Amino acid sequence: MTDLPVGRRERKKAATRQAIADAALRLFLEHGYDRVSIRDIADAADVSTTTLFKHFAGKEALVFDEDQAREAELVAAVRERDAGRSILDALRHHVLDTWLPVAEHAQAGEFNNLVNSTPALRAYGERMWTRHTASLGAAIAEDVGVDHDDVACVALARFVLEIPALTRDRRNRTAAVETIFDILEQGWEPPGKPAPRP
């Protein structure tokens, strides 16, 4: 038997992974996370449970199926930014370009309700964000030449990662994201305080 070309094999794996994740989310939203089994998801995606576990470590990972890609994109936003662009400016554009479309997706509200109403998913999400904080903080620290656990770099990473939660329910999410990045770049001033006179 002839092996599939790498490109085709990878596309097939990606399509299978996406089909599993889509089936899982649909079932979770329809029936609730706790009422759906791994077998239910495998059957809905027309794969074996063995195949499912080749793509996902566990049931929670099915909900956060883009977790590793998002983490890699965050780190790349720092490491691969254009020469002369600041870290904060690169992260600002990354959040605006990648998170806002997700927040405006038709299923965003249902997805957030699913996660917020399911203790196992809330806990998994928190562990995921903690890991993202460590990775992003390390990338920032490496860029500026300090230890990977430098508290200022870790704090900046954490603040950036909190932006989706802080702005999710705002009427104008773009303006809210911009406001938070302005605070990170320029410091905080009490709201309504008049600008200093020249």
Image: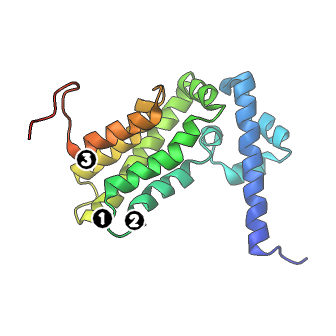
Quadrant of the image for the N terminus? bottom right
Q: Residue at x 39, y 65 (%)?
A: 79
Q: Is residue 3 left or right of residue 154?
A: right
Quadrant position of residue 54: bottom right
Point out residue 189 in the picture as x, y percentages from the top left corner: 18, 32
Quadrant position of residue 113: top right
Asked whether 106 or 41 is in front, the reply is 106
Indicate the amino acid at tag 1: Glu
Q: Are marks 1 and 2 in contact (CB under 8 Å)?
A: yes
Label 2 environment density (alpha carbons within 10 Å; few <14, some 14–19, many ≥20): some
Specify the label residue 142 is tagged with: 1
Q: Are marks 3 and 1 in contact (CB under 8 Å)?
A: no
Quadrant of the image for the C terminus? top left
Point out residue 184 in the picture as x, y percentages from the top left corner: 27, 43
Q: CA distance from mark 2 to mark 3?
A: 19 Å
Q: Is residue 90 left or right of residue 26?
A: left
75 lies above or below 84:
above
Label 3 environment density (alpha carbons within 10 Å; few <14, some 14–19, many ≥20): few
Residue receiving disc 2: 79
Q: Does the image show residue 135?
A: no
Indicate the amino acid at tag 3: Glu
Residue receiving disc 3: 185
Which structural element holds mark 2?
helix
Q: Are marks 2 and 3 in contact (CB under 8 Å)?
A: no
Q: CA distance from mark 3 to mark 1?
A: 19 Å
Which structural element holds mark 1?
helix
